[in-house]
Every structure is written in C-alpha cells, then in structure tokens.
Amino acid sequence: MRCGTNNSQERMVCDGSKNISLDCKDEVNVSLLKDDRSVSHCFGSVHFNHSGTLEAVCSKDWDKNDGQVVCRELGCGEVVSVSSGSQPQHGRMHDQVDCKGSEASLWHCLANHLESSTPCKTANVICSGSVKVRLSDGPGRCAGRVEIQYEGKWKSVGESNWKEENSKVMCKELNCGDAVAAPGTDSFIQGNSPVMDIEVTCVSGSTSISSCIKPTNKLQQQLQQQEKNKMLICQERWVVFLMGDSACSGKVGIERAGKSYWLSGSNDTWDRQTATVVCQQMDCGNATSINFESTSVVNASGTTDLWKYSYKCLPTNKSLFGCERSERLSNHSIASVVCSGSKTVSLKDDAGGEGKCWGKVDVCLNGMCGGVCEDAWTEHKSNMLCKAFHCGSAIYPLSYLKTKSQSADDKITIGSVHSTQQTTNISQCNMVKITDGSYCQNKPAYVVCSGSVKARLMYHRDRCSGNVQMFYQGIWRPVCETALQNQDVRNTICREQGCGHAVKPLSFFGPSPASSDAVVSGLSCSANSSSSAECGVTLTQTNNKQCSFGGLQCSEWRRMVLKLGKGACEGQVFVYSGAHGWAVSSDGWTETESKVLCTDLGCGAYINHTTMENAEDHDLWWGKKYSCKGKNNSIWDCELNDGPSQNQPLFVKCLDILTASLGDPGKCSGRVMLNNLPVCYDNWDDSHSKIACQEQECSNRISSEETNKGRRADGYFVSCSGSESNLGQCKTTKGKCGRGLVSVSCAGAVKFNSTQKCGGGIKILYRGTWESACLPDLFSKEADFLCKKLNCGSPRRFQTGLIEKSDEEKGLKTPETSLQCSSDNTDLEHCILKEKRCEKPDVIYCGGTTMITPPLVVQSANFQCFRLLSSQKAH
C-alpha cells in the first residue's frame, strides 16, 4: 500500500471472525496545482501529497476514468477534461496510472511508483466543480455578458460560437428561468476578459454549462478577436425603476420579462431602510421620505399589477432583491420614495460645454460626472436622448467621432444604460458603472441628433447658390464634390434652403478652408428627404488634395447687381435669375437695405440711394419688396413676400469702386487685375475672359492662361453668371489663390505682320509679344484674310526653294498658335487659337511679295564661279 507502518499495537488474527482494519502511519491526499505551483480548486496538475511531500502523477496513459476518480475524491463533480501538462517534473512520481473508475481514491488505482531521474509531464484534470457561469456588467445577475470560469479564469464567449440551447442551459443554471429570445434594446459592454478558445455546445438534456464544454475542439483565434461577445437576458431578470416627476423620486416599480409591476406599500411592507436600498440601487443617494400611493395609476398596458413579494432590507444590502423577502400582504397601495440624490444625462461637446443636440453622453450621479462606454450604447438610447432635448431623431450609426485626449474630469464611468417599458426619460434608466477603471476610456458614446445637422449654401452675394457646407458635431464643414454627385442629395439640400430643386453642381468658390478637421465625404438621401438631417453623413479626416470641395446651384438662384451706372458699385438695382434681369422697385427701400446691399456687393460703405423719376422704362420688374430689421446676414434675409405698390427704379451708390484692368493701359493683353489686386485662375473660364475684354473695349477674348503657377498669391476670386458687363458685378472675394493668376489676351491687342514685305514667315502680336503661327493651308480663307490685313492682295504660289529666308524668319520659334476661322467669322483677330497645329512656322506669299533670292553656285574642279541674282519682283 506504500503507506508506511501500522500505527495499531493490536495483534491481528486472520481467522475470518472479523474484518481487518489498518491504521497506517503515512497520510496521502490528492492535490491539484495551478501551473504546478499553488493549490487550486477542482482543476490543475495532479499530485499526491504524501505525508507533506508532493509527488507528481505522470500523464502517460492518463484518461477520463482516472480523472473521474480524482474529481469524485475531491468532491468536484464530474470530469470535464484530462490533458498532459507542459512542465516536466522530477523526483518521486507515479506513472501509468490505471483506474477502473469505481475507486474511492486515486491512490487505490494501479500505478508504477518510482524514483526516477527521467522527468515526466504531469497529468491534468478539470472537474465540473471548477466551471462557473455568470452574466457580467448588467443590471442584476440575470442579464449581461456571458462569462465562464474555466481553469480559474473568467472568459467571455464569442457570439458566433454560442447556440440557443446554451442560453437555455445557462439561464437555468443561474436560476433565472428561460432565456429571452432576443435582448431587444438592451446591450452590455464587451469587457476585457479573454475569450474562450474551446467549443461550448449544449444539447437537449444538458444540465450545466460544464457538461457542454468540448475541450478538444479548439476555435480559430483570429475569428475570436474579430467578433463580438455573447450577451444574454434571462426571463427572471428583475429591474427596479422609479416613475415620477424626476429621476430620483416616484413610485417603485419592478420589471420582469418586459412586464411592469408595482411594489406594495404599507407600514408593514415599506420602511425607510428598504427605501434607502432602492435609492442607492438607482444611484440616487438615500431616502428622504416615503409614502404609499393609490393603485389608481395604471401601467403602460392599462392594468395595475402588484409585485408578489415585499422586502425587509438591512444597511448591508446593496440590492432590493438581496433583502429578506416575504409574500406580499394583502393591500392595494404602491410604495413611493423621494431620494436625496440627483441623476442627469446630457450631451457635452468636445470643448467641455453643453452640446446643442450633439456631443458625448455625460451622466452625472449625485454630482459625479462621467461618460458612457460606446460598447453598449444603442440607437434606441440615442433616440431617447434626442427626443428628451427636442432635437429630433438620432443619426446612427456615426461615421466619425471627434476624439481628443481624455482629461481627469472627462473619464468614462458608466458601462451601460438600461431602460424599462415605463421609462419616459433616459435619466430614469438604471446605470451600470464600470468596475475596471481602465476599460473603455477612449471609446465614449457620442450622439448626433438630426436637430444639429443642417446644410447651407455659402456667400451672401447669391441666393440659392454657393459652396455647400454642413453643420455636423458643432462645426460647419465643407462638402466634397463626390458627396454631391447624386441628384437626390442635391435636391434635398436645395429643398432645405427653400430653393426649389438642384440645377447643377458648382466648383468650390474662394480660398480653401485652412482647417485640417474632418470634411463631409459622403451623403446619402432619399428622393423624399426634406432636409440633410434625414440623410446619412460620412465624415473623413482628409486634406484638400484628397477631396475637392463642391458647390451647388438651385432652381431659385438669383443675384442682385448694380447696373447702368459708373462701375459695379453704383447704379440701378437689378435681380438676375438665369439670363433675365428684373428691376427692383424703390418702394419700401431705405438706407438700411442699401447698407446691407453695399456690404454684400463688396462695395464698402453706403453713400446714398434715390428713386429715379426719369429713368428708362423697364419691361421686367422684380415682384418682391425688402425690409431689413435686426441682424441680417445678406439682402436675401430681408426679402418679403409682398410685392411693391408701384414700380419706380432704384439707384444705389456705394463708397468703393471695383476697377478692372488688363495689363498695361491700352494693350488689351496681360494680367487681369481688380482694384490693383491680381485675379486668381480658380473658377476662371472663357465667359469671364469675354467680360474682361469687353469691359476694356478690347473686342472679344482670344484666350486666357494661368501664370505664377503654384505660388499661392493673394488675389481676387471671381465668378460671373454671364449677364454682367464688368468684372466688378460678378461674385468676388479675396484670399490665397488655390491656383495661379489669370492672364487674358483680347482681339483688340492683335496685330499681324510678315518677315518680308507681303510675305515670308507669319508674325502675330499676341499675348504681348510677336510670335509665329500655323495656317490650315496656303490658300485657305485664313490666308486670304491675312493677305488683306497686310494690304497685299491675295495669296500667291512660289517655289519656296528659290526664296531665301530672312534672318528674322530663321529666328522664328515653333508655333504655339494657329489661325482657324469659324464659318461666320470674317475678322481674323477672332480666328486665333492657342493650339499647336504645325511643326515649323508657316509662311505666306501675297500678291505684293518682294522676294530675296539665294545666290546661284557653280562648281568645277579648279575654281568656283558665283553669280548673284539680283532681287526681282515676282510676276
């Protein structure tokens, strides 16, 4: 027996008259060690404690029969698994243990007991007594995150590896009834416990989770890290709530399986100490007064149900359901309480102030405030909060959360928030605090309500047209062009502004925003959306190179200008919409409206306004009056629905003068300037060049080009609609150019010449310098126009090899300009194209050409003979 010597002094007689008993000197117990070091309960490596000496049991031939004997001997239930340890053991050991399964002790099993210098790996066993289950971080023991204690560690379980039968078994094991099919609006934090890496699968008839563990079925670790943990709500989840005028007072209710009950109240069933436990459970301090109310107030289902139990609590109790309970006495009153504490829920913006319809969720319990973990925050709770603040509905899910470093006063203290069927305000919810102070500190719950989201079209000069911006998370953000590609999105923004439907997207106007904050990179609206608050919003942390900002023009677009005066800052007031202009009546117009208009036009201070008695008649009159009162952002804020009582032209004069120029005076070519400040190439097109040329009385435009590329100079941004007569009437603003500067060439600056009289290389004075050009053909209409410009008749044909090029012609560079006239164009100045259509400078010979012929060279073996042919007039 390897039990030492017999302690008994009696002489044993083997005559069959009685049983023989032995009292051996040695003591032998089975011990289970965690990590082969400390004694553990019901799991670990198997050792014999032989009179104070630990002797390892080796894993060779170790099986479930052997493990079952160990579990039964230690009172640890059934064997769950057996395995081989990883650490080799030395010294006295027991190898090749072989149990039948019925032995009372592992020591009684056959084994090879030896002293060996050869190490062996220990036998491991896990008994059902070491496997425990719980639902963590919920409002009570019957709801929360599924956790299983396995090998001494609490571990969560992946959602995809959990079966419905598992939930039923777990709820019953916890004495929590059956499992609820779906958690509904409740959610719990993910926690930071490790995830079970072995399969848990229960079948019908399983009585405990320990019997469902399949230790040989390992799960893929990569999948475990990516999925969510399993959450579970059992039928016997009991939740206390208060229904009253504030979060910390009212009738005491209990919700079970989605149904509300009321706690009975009388002198025998409701006292101050029990009421204090309820207040503390609701994070509302202590009870200041208690009362009993009539059951005339019904619950949401229209009935009054009293809870089946009453409670008697002690100061040590933390929960009403942990107090001594008894069957409810017969009465028809409901317990009510007023607590000393306070509980509020608000939205706090990133600057720490109260957010208006957006921000981080901030919960204050009795003056101690903190955030809520986003893990367990749901769309239902966001909607409750938005509704409580009269902020519309929640925008969910959020595509971007603005983050900043957490301060000591900004930590997250609440893990999850739980409502009941009776909850009307989110502050009435049960708050589950975070017990691990390090968890979720960088993942606060954010809420953005539709009441905080809106769009606008920037730049006051225009109505219903401009850069698109969206107010999101307390900041006006630019919108990328890609977010405005969908017609439903564009129509929604126009409808929100009261601007009809969308006509076309526009390029961004003005200097790009300097902010490196997030921009709106995506919008999704339905065809029936009435505002951007109903659209999905995608925000991206980006820069201007990754996102080109966009604008929008709506069908109700209009612009106010001053015309028929001296320059852009004085004249009659017109409203332009499309290609039409309507005169604005002076009826009701005052100095106040004039000041707003002068500011909108970028024309400085107001000088005067008058009604023009003898002005020319207008066929079209604008049917709106204007009245500016209080703070007005633009003249369009002053527009009334009333029409004028009489139509009399209005003349307004502002202080500033917007003067445009083009290169040196009279040159009709060069850099475009506005009040001596260059004009940016951003947004510039041919229609702008046409206005610039005609304003300078330089005929039509020929071309424009970008100069000073990449230098980001200060300049004017200009955007014209096509109805303007000078650049100052266009929409303008100052800032750093995104591109280079504008240089324009007008037809009035063009001159023509040739390198010889009436012929030779073609020369065009264009863009301020003489340059060569290409012709479609020597006898084309462009060539005919050119000869006439040179007063030289019509084009003629000559053998070009017999004509000597002048030095000037030889110096001409490869052309970058061509002459190409349209069918209705008879003026050569308007036929210039900035295009390269030939590889070398073209030449022309008109009727009046005077040619220089090259010398004739005759060679022989002994001498050279030269004959110089004199210049002669071609015939």
Image: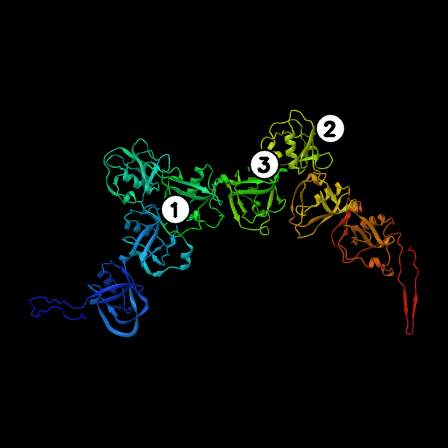
Q: Residue 416 carries which label?
A: 1
Assign the N terminus to one quadrant of the image: bottom left
**Badge 3 is on which residue?**
500
Label 1, residues with CA under 10 Å away: few <14, some 14-19, many ≥20: many
Label 2, residues with CA under 10 Å away: few <14, some 14-19, many ≥20: few
Q: Which of 401 and 754 is in front in this view?
A: 401
Q: Earlier in the sequence, mark 1 or mark 3?
A: 1
The vertical placement of 443 against 29, above or below, is: above
Callout 2, which amino acid? Ala
The vertical placement of 300 against 237, above or below, is: above
Percent x, y for residue 524? Answer: 52, 44
Callout 3, which amino acid? Gly
Q: Nearer the viewer, residue 137 or 701?
A: 137
Labels 2, 3: front one: 2
Residue 781 placement, left or right of 519: right
CB within 8 Å, label 1 to label 2: no
Q: Earlier in the sequence, mark 1 or mark 2?
A: 1
Q: In which quarter of the image is residue 252?
A: top left
Q: Which of 818 and 274 is in front in this view?
A: 274
Disc 3 element? loop
Percent x, y for residue 713? Answer: 67, 49
Find the distance from the CA under tag 1 to the CA under tag 3: 45 Å
Q: Which of marks 2 and 3 is nearer the N terminus?
A: 3
Residue 839 placement, left or right of 460: right
Residue 790 placement, left or right of 428: right
Disc 1 element? strand
Residue under the image location 85 percent in, 61 percent down:
801
Assign the C terminus to one quadrant of the image: bottom right
**Badge 2 is on which residue?**
615
CB within 8 Å, label 1 to label 3: no
Find the distance from the CA under tag 2 to the CA under tag 3: 34 Å
CB within 8 Å, label 2 to label 3: no
